[in-house]
Image: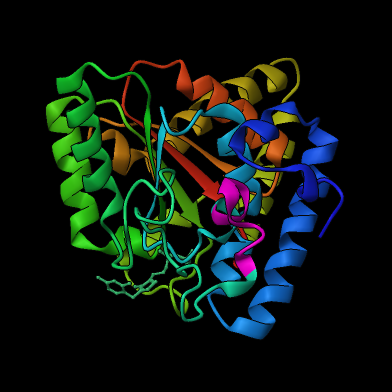
Amino acid sequence: MGKILSKINGPRDIQKLSMDELDILAEEIRELIINTVSKTGGHLAPSLGTVELTLALFRVFSPPTDKIIWDVGHQSYPHKIITGRKKRFGTLRQLGGISGFPKIKESPLDTFGTGHSSTSISAALGISSGKSLKNDDGMVIAVIGDGSMTGGEAFEGLNQTGHLNKNIIVILNDNEMSINPNVGALSSFFSRKLSSKPVVNLKREIEAILRSVPGIGDNIVKVVKKAEDAIKGFMTPGMLFESMNFQYYGPIDGHRIDRLVETLSNVKEIDARILVHIMTKKG
Ligand SMILES: Cc1ncc(C[n+]2csc(CCOP(=O)(O)OP(=O)(O)O)c2C)c(N)n1
């Protein structure tokens, strides 16, 4: 087991590490997952995609006061390793061993027992409502993949959360994959980022022509850039979530722990429903 991982006995230990140590820890967790799953079988690729996100979540939030819910749950191996199950990780999916999915009986930090997809936002809303009734502190965070976001219950959850004005944080873990590559209108909408090569080339050509106008060229470029920003805001996936009363942040690189920590720390302070769109690589 890696040097830093061997000293980690719970999420609180993550708070003591520097950013460089967190990057090393991410590598050590990947190594443990690969070594184990090569023997036991299991969901390798989804869990390798959430190592940095898991560390950033534990850096910023404080479970069990804050509740983290993993949609489907097949990407929760890093969570299991950090939450006291690293020594038993070799028993993953074996008779009498630890489950391949979050399991309430296995750890108080497994907030919601899963397996089915698209349930995390509804669960987060339910837990958040319970917290309000009991005057409990803490935030509720749902992590959902782009594949699971195409499930109807995810939208019921978003819709009702916006309606009830409950403050939850949804993290959309977008790796442009479900079990297979995604299909459908929603996935092409998520990947619409106005950054395709023809668009970038066209923008460069227009800028060069405008700048060549004597005297006023630079000013025109500034005005056009402002208009472009406004159009971007209108056309990006944020539009969908903003229409359901969520504030949208992203897309951000989900493998950069520093950027994740910065964004999550900022949104934690905002009194609203939040959707953070992160881009990761499956595997
Ligand atoms: C109700 C239901 N339907 C289908 C599945 C099968 N299934 C397992 S994972 C998954 C989606 C995985 O894609 P995504 O949510 O993007 O997560 P990723 O693995 O890419 O991190 C699906 C549909 C399921 N678990 N539950």
Q: Position of residue 191 (x, y in %)?
A: 48, 57
- Is residue 12 shown above or below 90? above
Q: Position of residue 91 (x, y in %)?
A: 58, 73
> Residue 218 vs residue 173: left or right?
right
User: Is-magenta flag for residue 81?
Assistant: yes
Residue at the spot 74% in from the left edge and 27% down from the top edge: 16
Residue furthest toward the front? 96
**What segment carries the magenta color?**
80-89
Task: Tell me, yes or no, if residue 253 can be seen here.
Answer: no
The quadrant in which residue 213 appears is: top right
> Residue 61 vs residue 18: left or right?
left
The quadrant in which residue 8 appears is: top right
Residue at the spot 51% in from the left edge and 58% down from the top edge: 76
Q: Which image quarter is the C terminus in? A: bottom right
Task: Tell me, yes or no, if residue 251 can be seen here.
Answer: yes
Q: Which image quarter is the N terminus in? A: bottom right
Q: Quadrant of ligand 1?
A: bottom left
Residue at the spot 49% in from the left edge and 56% down from the top edge: 174
Q: Nearer the viewer, residue 66 or 164?
A: 66
User: Is-magenta flag for residue 113?
Assistant: no
- Is residue 232 shown above or below 112? above
Q: Nearer the viewer, residue 148 or 217?
A: 148
